[in-house]
Amino acid sequence: MRLISNRLYFDYNATSPLADSVKEFVLKGDFLFGNPSSSHTTGRQADAVVRQARQKILQIFELNEADYKLFFHSGATEGANTVIKGYAKHKKISFFYAGTDHSIMSGIAEELASEGHAVEVFHPDRHGQLLVESLIEKINLKKAQGYFPLLNFTCVNNETGVVWPLSFAMQIKKETGAVIHVDAVQLPGKMDNWHKLLAGLDAYTFSAHKFGGLKSVGLTIYKKDFSFAPLLQGGGQEDGLRAGTVNVLGIYAAELALTSLRKLFDANSLQTAKNYIEQNLTGILGERGEVIGYHSPYRNLNTITFLIYGKRADSLMPAFDLSGMDVSFGSACQAGQVRPNKVLLSMGYSEQQSLSPIRLSFSPFMKLEEAKFFFKEIESVISRFL
Ligand SMILES: Cc1ncc(COP(=O)(O)O)c(C=O)c1O
């Protein structure tokens, strides 16, 4: 049974515990401390570790070194800001993002709009699915007006687990020529074939703490012929894309975590475990609630977001917490006030319903036996509200 500090932790989309391989490495305490920019032996040793991590990560994602490079940074927030704002630095762009995207994107959009770029937010259907044809039309319209289009494409939604297949992004790329930045933060360990990135898209951004690495470490894989300006000025590290002394320990841990995830992840086993919880959950909810995105044809393997009609998340949340379970509100909470979940609003849910989602996001290694136990615990809380 996977208990973390005696809690049942169901919030893997927020962050994950360290991978066992990373824990072992950290416990050894024997780290390379050299600065990869130094030309002496200690520096060169550290540089070799970073180079190897770059190569291995590209191999894991099945992308060719002839076509792609990657740079490390402090996480997806920085990676997305660098790529999108860096592309907009010398061009008049039109930035397309979804109402279901992480709040990074609305923040960037606001800044770009204030600088005179065009920005456009689009919304999915009620099940969270992307409306590909209408997006293609919108992008081509802006292109015809002389803008350089850039689309942020979140392939796995962090709040609902709804998946937008990368093949959709490829179709958009082919039919519009837009630059496509993929927010791939929720991909590793949450879908079958999560490691098969498609060659042709411009950039993919990840955060290591979502897949068993350390916090404040991330990476962006980008096409060699895609150019963008750096966010920071300084020592020219990471091919000039990310100034600042390189975090060798964090980068090595990210490589370790991804390598073990690739080796150990079993999509069928996770699917079986998740299905057990979801089928039983929909059974007890009946007409009194729903699983968000349930009817979407593409969903990930670790996320179940549900609501009970008329019950606010802030009434269920303390009950889960007191029963030893860490679940996510699925709604923004500021100064004790729950606000409607913007992802649900974007999908067309009412303000009232958008106050209710509870997100359960599970370990990539959850097994059926654990799922059976978890469901009993989850049911014991939910049944009090039905
Ligand atoms: C889909 C998605 N994108 C981006 C981020 C931002 O990641 P970080 O906070 O590590 O920068 C998150 C984090 O929750 C996320 O889920």
Image (cartoon, helix red, strand yellow):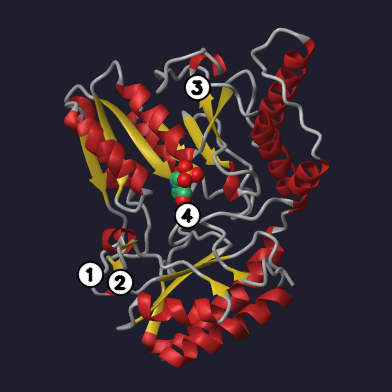
- Indicate the amino acid at tag 4: Val
Marks 2 and 4 sit apart, C-alpha to C-alpha, by 23 Å
Image depth: mark 1 or mark 4 in front = 1
Describe the element under mark 1 as helix, strand or loop: loop
Residue 98: percent from the left, percent from the top?
32, 47
Q: Which mark is residue 355?
A: 2
Identify the residue shown where x is 59% and y is 47%.
Answer: 209
- Indicate the amino acid at tag 2: Leu
Crowd band around label 3 with a 10 angstrom C-alpha radius: few (<14), some (14–19), many (20+): many
> Which residue lies under the disc numbered 4?
163
Image depth: mark 2 or mark 4 in front = 2
Crowd band around label 4 with a 10 angstrom C-alpha radius: few (<14), some (14–19), many (20+): many
Describe the element under mark 3 as helix, strand or loop: loop
Q: Are marks 2 and 4 in contact (CB under 8 Å)?
A: no
Q: Earlier in the sequence, mark 2 or mark 4?
A: 4
Q: Which of marks 3 and 4 is nearer the N terminus?
A: 4
Identify the residue shown where x is 51% and y is 45%.
Answer: 185
- Indicate the amino acid at tag 1: Glu
**Rendered-image quadrant of the N terminus:** bottom right
Marks 3 and 1 sit apart, C-alpha to C-alpha, by 40 Å
Marks 1 and 4 sit apart, C-alpha to C-alpha, by 24 Å
- Indicate the amino acid at tag 3: Arg
Marks 2 and 3 sit apart, C-alpha to C-alpha, by 39 Å
Identify the residue shown where x is 57% and y is 67%.
Answer: 10
Q: Are marks 1 and 2 in contact (CB under 8 Å)?
A: yes
Marks 1 and 2 sit apart, C-alpha to C-alpha, by 7 Å
> Which residue lies under the disc numbered 3?
242
> Which residue lies under the disc numbered 1?
351
Describe the element under mark 2 as helix, strand or loop: helix
Residue 313: percent from the left, percent from the top?
37, 75
Question: Horizontally, is 171 left or right of 348 in the view?
Answer: right
